Amino acid sequence: MIELPDLVAGALAAGTLSAFALGGGLVRSRRRQNRQLAEIAALRTRLDGTARAFTAEVEHLATQRVPAAARQVAHPHLSVPGPLQPLTAGTPLGIALENVVLALQSEAAAQRTRIDAAAQAGMRGAVREIQAALYRLQDALRGLQQRYDDPELAQTLFRLDHENEQSLRRAQVAAVVCGAWVGLAREESHLVDAVTGGQARLAGYQRVQVHNHLEPGTALVSHAVEPVAVIVAELLDNALRHSAPDTDVVVSLEHVHHGVCVTVDDAGLGMTHDERERAQRLVAGDDPILLTDLGDPPRMGLAAIGRLTRQFDLSVDLSSASPYGGVRAVLRVDSHLLSRLDPADRPPAASAPRTTRTTRRTAPDRPATPTPAHAYGTEAGAPEAPPGHREPQDDEGDGLPQRRRRTRTAAPAAAPARSPARRPEDAAAALGALQSGTAAARAAARDPGHSPRPHAAADHTDRNNDIDHIDDEGGAAR
């Protein structure tokens, strides 16, 4: 039988052992708790650092990357900054932030296109109203030119008509850039008439020299006449604006393997490599045209060329330099846009430069003399005159040309020496008188027995091949 003291001693020993075991467990538990607290503190510190880094990254996105991405939509050459922390790239956070930038750019580009389309639609409607008003003014000026024979009044009306024609050209270009139709329907016309028609729409057209090396009768199909005239006018306008006023702009019309090329050379400063690339992109017409990309004020000439080249299957190249130091612009018209007219039945305009391929006869009592390219209607051996120019006659003592009927078979009269400098008013008056005589000659050719009365200067753009026709009295009927 176990005695009480032994039992108590065993119980005390067991309690001591249990106390030691419990104390060890408590110590281990506290150590684990301390380690967990340390890990929690480290995680909290790491989380605080991550939150601060994320906040800084979002602030960088809002203040730097998003504005740069919006600017890049309009200016692709600008760069968008990357993440603030380089290690963020490629992480889920970095990928999410990059997707924000891409989505912003996509939506900004879509909104920009929609806003520009709405602006173009509004501008197109406004320009159409302006064009209609300018056409009415043009008809009124033509009516006055036909009604009055006073030389001074005819000269004033010619200047007004020319100014109106320039305003009409600008309105037409703006409408084309905004997606409108080119605006005029014409019948088949000689290509040289389309070129000189575009030339006559410009201020400073006297500086343009046209060299016609085409076969006689080379013409354009009806739907290509007005686009070619508009493109030539814009190329010449750029050449005249970016070259010195005492230099000439040379235009050459040549046959090539696949059609005809109209080459425009100026003696300006030329373009830099970047300017040339941008101009070539515009005239190619491959990229969408936005009004906001054309500057302030918008420069619409090259953009209009791009619209027309794409719509009518034409080609314009600005990649080469002119031999005179400026820019060479080449308009190529492919064979499917070309036609042929009989020069005997439908001759080109009298003011158009004659082709150098035409062989002219000389009188038997006069030695053969080479005829210059633009010497139509001038005496052999006389200095070459610009298109549409007529030398003053002996009876023009007051400085203004007198209207007279001129035919191709009339003997050329001796002209006095050409003055080295002429006033613009004299040139305008001379051109107006030449056009008046041209209209009279055509009326006489249609009705040999009819003697036309003198009338005012006709439209200087030489629209004899338009669907607008000239009646027996020289009046324009639209």
Image: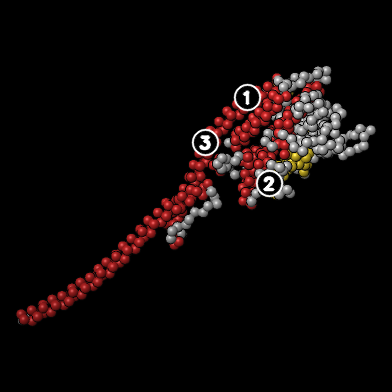
Residue denoted by label 1:
136
What residue is disc 2 on?
268
- First of labels 1, 2 by sequence position: 1
Regarding residue 306, the answer to whether it shows in the image is no
Q: CA distance from mark 1 to mark 2?
A: 37 Å
- Which image quadrant is residue 426 in? top right
Give coordinates of residue 83: x percent, y percent. 45, 57
Q: Amino acid at mark 1?
A: Arg
Query: Which secondary structure, mark 3?
Result: helix
Q: Earlier in the sequence, mark 1 or mark 3?
A: 3
Q: Quadrant of residue 53?
A: bottom left
The quadrant in which the C terminus is found is top right
Answer yes or no: is residue 126 visible: yes
Q: Which residue position holds label 3? A: 118
Labels in figure, total: 3
Residue 4 appears at what percent x and percent y?
Answer: 5, 80
**Element class at badge 1:** helix
